[in-house]
Amino acid sequence: MGRIDRIPPFGWLAAANFAFGLGFGVYGTIFFNFIGQDLGISPDQLGLLESIREIPGLLTMVLAALVMTVAEPIVGAFALLLLGAGYINYVHVDSVPSLIGFSVVASIGFHMWMPISSTLALRLTSVSEQGRRLGQLRSVTAIAQVLGIAFVAVVANIVELRYLFVVAGAASVSGALLVLRVRGLPSVQRPRRIVIRRAYGLYYALTFLDGARRHIFMTFALFLLVRDHGSPVQVIAILSLINGAISVTAAYGFGRLIDRFGERLILMTSFGALSAIFIGYAIVPVVGVLFVLYVLDNLFFSAETGVTTYLRKIIVSTSDIRPSLTVGMTINHIAAVIIPITGGLLWEAYGHWVPFIGGSILALMSMALSSRIRLDRHSASRPVIRSIDTAP
């Protein structure tokens, strides 16, 4: 018991992220094979599913406002419980409506957890070390995902895919217990509001474009490999293992690069590379090349920690961190509700190249906006232009 008591708060947060990553690793590896091969859904049905299950992301600001005065560890535990419940109930899915229903439950938990996890990390970390610490947290999550993926690779031939969702859910539930151990947070004012500041406008724009681009790739990249190229779950597991192994070092590495060279250079480089990767997915018919591009996309995804660290450096007050990240999550999902269903319909009508070319354009727009990053703390002293009071 004495050793447990000596674990620092960041250690418990890392452990909760490990549990989250383990569950997400199992879930992410089997999901597209499950829906593409077991359920046989079409691209337009996939687009509809993704758009609906991203609605909780769009409502993140509302959900967070309702619990803004509740301590972050408690909210985080509730979020991981919801996520686990959604995963576990995939075992019952036998139609698109039931798939959508349980996906929404899991999505609510996922979209509540992400800003809470980042908030806890930033509150437990000094500004000078935030890139490294966020990188460490991503690396821990990546290690757990690798283990989850490896588990799937070993048992996929002997266990029906739907039963592996129970394993994913159990891991998430264990994370709920771990995050409750995060104590001793620095005291900050807890406003009953969601803050939107004009000074954070560039952060909002980058977050919006990131959500649009990311959800195109998340929705359609693996689906293309499974549906059009017939990639089995073992191949997807191997790809995911490679991604996870790269992420273990890439997340920490990009965090250190951000601390050393700043957000502007790292984000511009990563968004430029992502634009080229999208073009590759649009025009390259060779599945082996697509495998490489999929891994490279995951590599440069780690650089997007810079969007979060940029916000932390321009923040007016530490009490702004949680509500601002929540607003960012909501903005991130405005496009996410529209783009998957639109991309699915365009794929059905014209071919898979259309959504990927769109993703390339969005990445170029993000690159252009990243060039405008100027870290001037005085610019963050402008007044709040909107404050939403959540008091009854």
Image (cartoon, grey):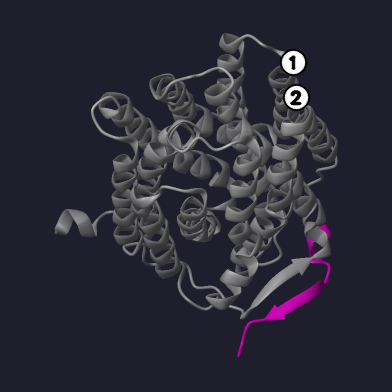
Q: Quadrant of residue 163?
A: top left
- Magenta residues span 379-392
Residue 221 marker: none
24 sits to left or right of 370: left
Amino acid type at image mark 2: Trp
Q: Position of residue 115 (x, y in %)?
A: 55, 57
Q: Nearer the viewer, residue 286 or 387?
A: 286
Whether label 2 touches label 1, CB < 8 Å: yes
Query: In this image, 159 relative to 45: left or right?
Result: left
Magenta stretch containing residue 386, yes or no?
yes
Residue closer to the observer: 223 or 327: 223
Q: Earlier in the sequence, mark 2 or mark 1?
A: 1
Q: Which residue is denoted by mark 2 in the rendering?
A: 353
Residue, x 79% and y 74% (percent of image)?
386
Q: Quadrant of the N terminus?
A: bottom left
Secondary structure under tag 1 reads: helix
Residue occupying the point 52% across, 24% down = 226
Is the residue marked by circle 2 packed among few (<14), some (14-19), or many (20+) residues within 10 Å? some
Q: Secondary structure at mark 2?
A: helix
Residue at screen point 62% across, 28% down = 300
Residue 121 in sight here: yes
Q: Which residue is mark 1?
A: 283
